[in-house]
């Protein structure tokens, strides 16, 4: 069965006020499905952005929102038992590599305790497929590229990465013990309109309008520049929805998949593309004031996804270029903050 053959399914999405959770919930609702959204609406970044995402979702009659923290097991169990979802997509997590250096407790609470609660709840309601967010960060400082799902990933270089690797291990164990079909998605640098303000493309744009320089953590080394596999939000969502009706089979019903663009971009090319997108939108030449600094603890020099496994499973590879994706982000950003008196 493929996604287009699904009819009127009930999906529980955690992190529904978050970036990926919002777009996924919106797509599912547009396709005629029922969505139970869970989010704790924390203030890791601008809460108004989360509230605006929720306002959009609440316009759909088949959307139900429950404010709940996945680390609260009792409350989470109540939501699961009342909703009895057929499919669960866990996107709730404490995100960010650098933030984990300052606030490690938040990562243990949300990404490990919270995730354990999710799989426990899935066990109780017999879900058909649990899909959960992992991360490209599990590959650590892997020098073999492109990164493949079979690569060794036991040397994470940040606590965030370690928590995501733990999610994969926990999901694998629960699939083995309790026959819960589970798929982990290793996301590669997701970006787009209404995205996360802590991501570089968003933060750089904020600094431009605040007339501040941007910090580039590559030591100014253009020959050995950092590069990232930037993946546009629409491509991420298409990959997720196509995977919903394809739970793993076999002795242990657990798989992990990369979702990346398979076209890594050097950091400086990414910045130049952002400058061009801003110039196009504002009608004048835009250039950032750049300050170069050493690479930060926990950062990795490169991310580069092999997408062969996902393509074999669902027949899809991301296609959005960095130029088109960043232009869509900038067009949204300027209009959104103008309307909200932000610029």
Image (cartoon, rainbow, N blue to C red):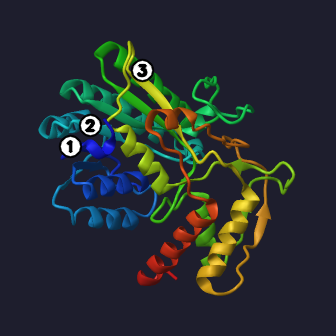
* Residue 134, visible in the rendered structure: yes
Image quadrant assignment for residue 128: top left
Instruction: Report the disc number at residue 108.
Output: none
Q: Secondary structure at mark 3?
A: helix
Q: Is residue 109 left or right of residue 230?
A: left
Report the residue marked by disc 3: 172
Instruction: Report the disc number at residue 87.
Output: 2
The x, y position of residue 92, in whole percent, is 38, 44
Marks 2 and 3 sit apart, C-alpha to C-alpha, by 17 Å
Image quadrant assignment for residue 82: top left
The x, y position of residue 329, in whole percent, is 53, 68
Of label 1 and label 2, which has the lower sequence position?
Answer: 1
Instruction: Report the disc number at residue 9.
Output: 1
Please tell me whether residue 317 is drawn above or below residue 255 in the rendered image: below
> How crowded is the residue under tag 3: few (<14 C-alpha within 10 Å), some, or many (20+)?
many
Of label 1 and label 3, which has the lower sequence position?
Answer: 1
């Amino acid at each position: 069965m493929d996604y287009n053959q699904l009819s009127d399914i009930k999906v529980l999405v955690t992190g529904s006020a978050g970036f990926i959770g919002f777009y996924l919930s919106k797509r599912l609702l547009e396709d005629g499905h029922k969505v139970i959204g869970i989010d704790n609406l924390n203030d890791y970044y601008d809460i108004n952005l989360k509230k605006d995402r929720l306002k959009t979702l609440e316009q759909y009659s088949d959307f139900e929102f429950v404010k709940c923290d996945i680390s609260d097991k009792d409350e989470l169990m109540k939501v699961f038992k009342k909703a009895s979802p057929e499919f669960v997509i866990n996107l709730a997590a404490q995100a960010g590599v650098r933030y984990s250096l300052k606030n490690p407790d938040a990562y243990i609470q949300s990404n490990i305790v919270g995730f354990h609660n999710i799989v426990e709840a899935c066990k109780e309601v017999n879900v058909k497929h649990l899909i959960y967010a992992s991360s490209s960060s599990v590959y650590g400082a892997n020098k073999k590229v492109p990164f493949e799902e079979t690569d060794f990933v036991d040397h994470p270089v940040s606590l965030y990465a370690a928590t995501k690797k733990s999610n994969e291990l926990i999901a694998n164990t629960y699939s083995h013990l309790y026959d819960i079909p589970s798929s982990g998605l290793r996301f590669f640098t997701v970006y787009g309109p209404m995205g996360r303000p802590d991501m570089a493309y968003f933060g750089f744009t904020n600094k431009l309008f605040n007339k501040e320089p941007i910090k580039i953590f590559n030591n100014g080394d253009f020959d050995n520049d950092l590069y990232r596999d930037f993946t546009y939000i629409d491509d991420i969502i298409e990959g997720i929805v196509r995977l919903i009706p394809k739970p793993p089979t076999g002795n242990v019903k657990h798989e992990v998949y990369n979702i990346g663009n398979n076209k890594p971009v050097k950091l400086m090319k990414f910045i130049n593309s952002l400058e061009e997108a801003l110039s196009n939108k504002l009608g004048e030449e835009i250039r950032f004031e750049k300050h170069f600094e050493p690479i930060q603890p926990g950062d990795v020099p490169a991310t580069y996804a092999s997408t062969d496994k996902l393509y074999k499973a669902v027949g899809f590879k991301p296609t959005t270029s960095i130029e088109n994706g960043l232009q869509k982000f900038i067009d949204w950003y300027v209009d959104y903050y103008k309307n909200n008196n932000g610029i």
